[in-house]
Amino acid sequence: MAHTRYPDFLDDEDFPALGQELKSCRRTLLDLQRLKKRYDDLPSKSKFSWERTEMSFNSLAEIRARILSLRQNVTMLTTNMIACSQVNVERLLRKLLEEQSDEGSVLSSLSSGSLSLSDNEAWE
């Protein structure tokens, strides 16, 4: 299995918790693939003999529980990232508006109502 390269915005340095969860997802997937490979490598007659391959329902139940836990953790992390991103964008917009207001810039001093008719046409 080839190593997956995640997009730059999923950098472990920026989002260490998400990086750890992604590594856990990969380990769980590899465990599941190994379990399936052991089953696939059995002769046809033996495939129904779970005891011979030590494939028990406990192994599958453990992997299922890990997948469910990982799904919950990744969902929580991405929800937190979205909330943090939204808060950050709002903070940056407020800062931009404050700077523009303080400097008396074009953004704060012009509105469509303050433009003459010819200026309005130029902006459209």
Image (cartoon, helix red, strand yellow):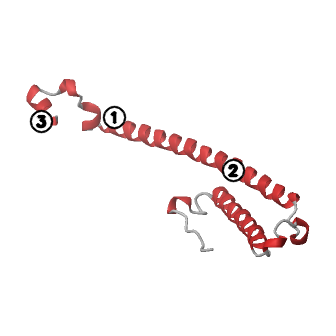
Q: How far across and how far down the image is residue 68, in percent?
A: 74, 50
Point out which mark residue 122 bears: 3
Labelled pair 1, 2 in contact (Cβ < 8 Å) = no
The N terminus appears in which quarter of the rendering? bottom right
Q: Is residue 67 above or below residue 23?
A: above
Give the mark toward the camera: 2 or 3.
2
Which residue lies under the disc numbered 2? 71
- Residue 24, located in which quarter of the rendered image? bottom right
Give the residue displayed 66% in from the left and 45% down from the top: 76
Binning the other alpha carbons within 10 Å of mark 3 as few (below 14), some (14 to 19) or many (20 upward) gives few
- Left or right of 49: which side holds 18? left
The mark that comes first in sequence, 2 or 3, is 2
Q: Residue at 68% of width from left, 58% of height from top?
A: 21
User: How far is mark 1 from mark 2, CA to CA?
Assistant: 45 Å
Residue type pointed to by label 3:
Ala
Q: Residue 62: x and y, percent?
A: 83, 57
**Dots 1 and 3: beta carbons under 8 Å?**
no
Q: Residue drawn 88% across and 58% down?
A: 58
Circle 2 packing at 10 Å, graded few (<14), some (14-19), many (20+), is some
Residue 101 got which mark?
A: 1
